[in-house]
Amino acid sequence: MTLIDDLNQIAQAAQADLDQEGVDLEQVRVAYLGKKGKITQVLKSMKDLSVDEKKAVGQVGNQVREAIQTSLDEKKEAQAAAALNAKLAAETIDVTLPGTKPKLGNRHVLQQIMDEIEGHFLGLGYQVIDDPVDSPEVETDEYNFERENLPKDHPARDMQDTFYITPEILLRTQTSPVQSRALEKHDFSKGPLKMIAPGKVYRRDTDDATHSHQFHQVEGLVVGKNITMADLKGTLLSIMQELFGEKHQIRLRPSYFPFTEPSVEVDVSWDEVTEDTKPEDIRWIEVLGAGMTHPNVLKMDGVDPEEYSAFAFGLGPDRFAMLKYGVEDIRQFYLNDVRFLDQFNKRGN
Ligand code: PHE
């Protein structure tokens, strides 16, 4: 057996090892090509050979070495590709499986009503004032009361006791102060002022089924030339029919507010009213206060009551929501119980 035969046998053995399933390539490399590997061993034993023989064996040794190295490289690539394919197969996503549906929130029922009111008045060309600069919840006594024709000793203040921060600063009891803030800024050369102001108000009431120390109002004010009570009535009828339905009617009753003269309380019919309905059969429910703005209020806000007239109204979205949805306790709106709020989820998820 010549050394050349030995080398050829080594080449075959190496190939057989490499063909084995799951072979450890590094182990094969060390065993055959390493410093103490099989090829080195053969080459070491040629010291007694002639120069020509050494040359011939050396050549075959190099060929075998290269052949094994090439096979090793190929195997290495094949193993890497197989590993990648296995990984890809394991991570396959089945896009046809049903997904998990995220639970989406929805607008609070009071917000839904206020959005409906806003949408209606935007359609009538009103501006909506609800930013904290022009419609602050922390108000001065001057804007909340005095500018609304309620001087410090006025008895009507008793009905709107509130949370004072200092004797001159308080949580607003009504959205009416936004009227004065808007009027002060309005430029009448650009036309009449038509605004609504939706927002939170506060009163020092003891909470019960019909009272909450925090509730909502939507203030309305129109100031221009020749504004009359007929404009007020038409406007209120349009918003009530928007909210309760076109067949509902309204009724105005005389009332008192210090900042309007005359003042009215407005009722809406509980049921639809048709030509056949007898007036005495209509059930009325009170929904808001309104009136023609008092000349004193216009004067205090720098508007000449001889030239301009105005109407104002204040709606209560909490009360609307109670009537519309049959909610018997106003506190439900503020408890944030999802079981209650979910009933008004229009998305239905
Ligand atoms: N601000 C009044 C209230 O809170 C409601 C109102 C507003 C009445 C505007 C008339 C005009 O009771």
Image (cartoon, grey):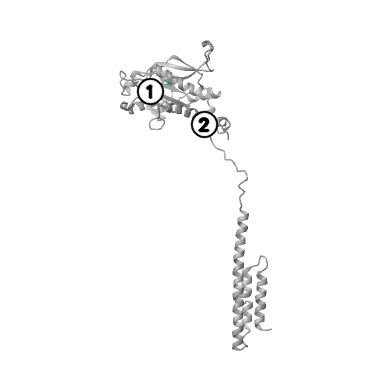
Place of residue 313 in the rendered image (x, y in percent of width and height, measured from the top left): 42, 21
Place of residue 36 in the rendered image (x, y in percent of width and height, measured from the top left): 62, 77
Give the image quarter of residue 11: bottom right
For marks 2 and 1, give the CA distance. Answer: 29 Å
204 in relation to 101, above or below: above
Determine the residue located farthest toward the front in the rendered image.
275
In this rendering, the label closer to the viewer, 2 or 1: 1
**Crowdedness of circle 1 by 10 Å Cα count: few (<14), some, many (20+)?**
many
Place of residue 99 in the rendered image (x, y in percent of width and height, measured from the top left): 60, 43
Residue type at mark 2?
His
Determine the residue located farthest toward the right in the rendered image.
1
Residue ID for mark 1 = 222
Left or right: 157 in relation to 301: right
Quadrant location, the N terminus: bottom right
Q: Which residue is more in the foreground, 148 or 47?
A: 47
Determine the secondary structure under disc 2: loop
Left or right: 300 in relation to 99: left
Determine the secondary structure under disc 1: strand
**Crowdedness of circle 2 by 10 Å Cα count: few (<14), some, many (20+)?**
some
Tell me, for residue 108, which label it has, or none. 2
